[in-house]
Amino acid sequence: MNNVPHLGNIIGCVLSADAFARYCRSSGREALFVCGTDEYGTATEAKALEEGVTPKELCDKYYALHKGIYEWFGISTDIFGRTSTQKHTEITHEIFLSLYKNGFIAEEEIEQAYDEKAQMFLADRFIEGTCPHCGYDAARADQCEKCGKLLNFDELLNPVSKLSKTPPVKRRSRHLFIDLPKLQSRVGEWIGQASKEGDWSGNSVQIAKSWLAEGLRRRCITRDLKWGVSVPLPGWEDKVFYVWFDAPIGYISITANLTGKWREWWQNPQGVSLYQFMGKDNVPFHTVIFPSTLIGTGKGWTMLHHLSTTEFLNFEGSKFSKSKGIGVFGNDAVESGIPADVWRYYLLTNRPEKMDTNFTWQDFGEKLNNELLANIGNLVNRTLVFTAREFEGKVPEPVFCADDKTFMEAQNARLAEVGALLEKVQLKDALHLAMHCGKEANAYFQKNEPWKAAKEDRAKCAASIYVLLHQVKDLAIALEPFIPHTSAAIFGQLNIEPRKWDDIGKLSLPVGHQLGKPEILFRKIEQKEIAALAAKFSGKQVKVEEKKAQPAGQAKKEQPGAKPAAAPVEPILASAIDFEVGKITAIRRHPNAEKLYVETVQMGGGERQIVSGLVPFLKEEELLGKLVVIVKNLKPAVLRGIESQGMLLAVESGGKLEVLSPANAKPGDKVAVEGLPAVTFNEITIDQFATVKLEVKDSIALAGGKRMLVNGAPIKTEKVAEGKVK
């Protein structure tokens, strides 16, 4: 979890699971949607070392980032948890000790890969080399992602540490193993039964059975690390559990952190069906290793019922790469200015269920303009606008003809099939069919020509509009799992509370019911916007920057004694900055810098000392008593001998400067970023702060292109209408 999720990560698990969970709730089931971050392991230790923070600090940072992105996407988890909790340790210990007691834990001394330069044992994922089976030159030490063969470090040709780029050496160390050969017959029997009852995909069954066919081997479940779940046995204090042993237990422990009745969900195989969503590369761990762990305890665990996997989503024909600037990542989508439902729709309608799919900006724009806008947006708007004009915005009384009844019966049958597809977790087909229902409703509108009937046959006009209003209502229900924000907006325009799945096909809008105000659901995206977005995320901007940094015709040489390049700064969400209103209660000149003031600012939790470079622009009396916006969670910095405990924001343009000063505010009021969830970090660095674009346009303060609000009102400027905020 120590990275920013890209679109492929999002559709592979959380978004797909969200669509199904929403359908389950709408159809009346008691559903629990659990997700979270697995936080232990070598990857976390290595990333923390790279960023110069502790593993816990790193996990706090990325947990907040993931949570904020998923909340913006509308992911409706009952709990978004994490594995670095006491409850997780307790349940992992319970499961391990059951395996140990039952004789399924073995001890062996093994040779491990050790990076002498980084001074640490290496997890399989941090060793790359050439696959001995297919010749792929970027195979990991645990599995070749090209041919799918399981590997060991010993088998890999020309192995290299990804941390130091040096060949790893072998060192001996004793470890604990789960004895999978002893469990093979029981696991094989379970796979044969569960894969049929749960209708696993052919690919998932093939992967699981290929593991069985090769013969299960003992699998090491401990590592020589400090960051991880401790091993509850004497003499093993210097080891922790391997992340792929404890991470799947996170589903259970996260549930336990939500409810004390977690065993009613996880030890209830007759009463609970477990659905899991993931990319295809995680299939072996969820069909073989984790089930083996649960079976080996001898307790009645709720086992996997249905496994929904995806292939890979590529970006414009390439793999996503944060370092190369290729692809759209979660934070990019949040700050793109494009609503979450548009992203949800595109990812779900192109969900890579049976083969890899490709994100292209051109296709993205066409899906928005030609499907969401031209189909659903058009149907809802034209129906409600027409009703407002011809029937005073009220549901008219119908007298149906035979064609009306035939149309409604056909639509009801199609929408019933949408539900049947969702029952089978065929999400993409279900969405396509729901959108087809929208096309049929638009065709019905055109065929019945209510604009003519309003003048020539009011009864026919009333019946057509009555039918169309119910089509709008039914589509709001059927599309809610996929585009929930749009569904909520439609229910708002119908002036009714959201309806559940069992209301589809019911003529439940009372005659005379007053509808809400029609509003546009989707904005057309122009070709020039598509071109700009395509250029921004193509990776070309990174190459240009690299080219500028290197003189023409010269190779970049490392100077003797030069410091290594700093690790790239992961961008943060605008809402990760803790903006707060403060009041300047005292001000003085900095004793060691002629252009700096030292201000005492009253905040919500007490006073802060702020150092700012405002001397050339404003007099002391102009600032004293003024309300200002402070970046409260910025890491303190010593400026010419005096500590600044935050940053005061001002906009500057053409030599003019104006301090951001919210109206109708008081010290301690929080500044929100419009449309973004609050995901405040404990502390951010100045480099992280610089990744968020702050500016003023048309006298409105913006963060990441979104309005900055205090008590729901935008922060406005009086003197500087446009400029950079700093």
Image (spheres, rainbow, N blue to C red):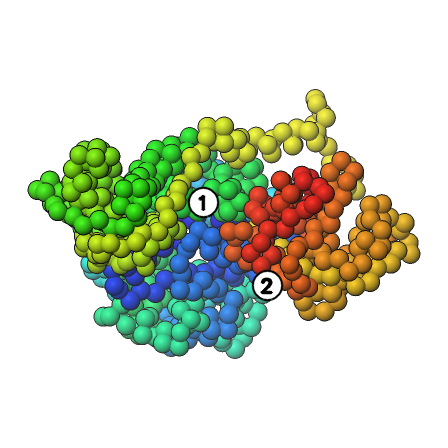
The quarter of the picture where residue 670 lies is: bottom right
Q: Along the polypeptide, which appears first: circle 2 or circle 1?
A: 2
Label 2 environment density (alpha carbons within 10 Å; few <14, some 14–19, many ≥20): some
Residue 190 at x, y percent in the picture: 24, 62
Residue 56's label in the rendered image is 2
Residue 367 at x, y percent in the picture: 36, 35
- Answer with left or right where residue 7 lies relative to residue 228: left
Q: Secondary structure at mark 1?
A: loop
Residue 189 visible from this viewpoint: yes
Question: Which amino acid lies under the numbered mark 2 shown in the image of this protein?
Answer: Lys
Q: Secondary structure at mark 2?
A: helix
Q: CA distance from mark 2 to mark 1?
A: 33 Å
Label 1 environment density (alpha carbons within 10 Å; few <14, some 14–19, many ≥20): some
What residue is shown at x 85% (from left), y 54% (from top)? 620
Question: Which amino acid lies under the numbered mark 1 shown in the image of this protein?
Answer: Pro
What residue is shown at x 79% (from left), y 63% (from top)? 585
The quarter of the picture where residue 372 lies is: top left
Residue 703 at x, y percent in the picture: 60, 47
Identify the residue under disc 1. Answer: 339
Check the image and name the residue furthest to the front.
Answer: 455
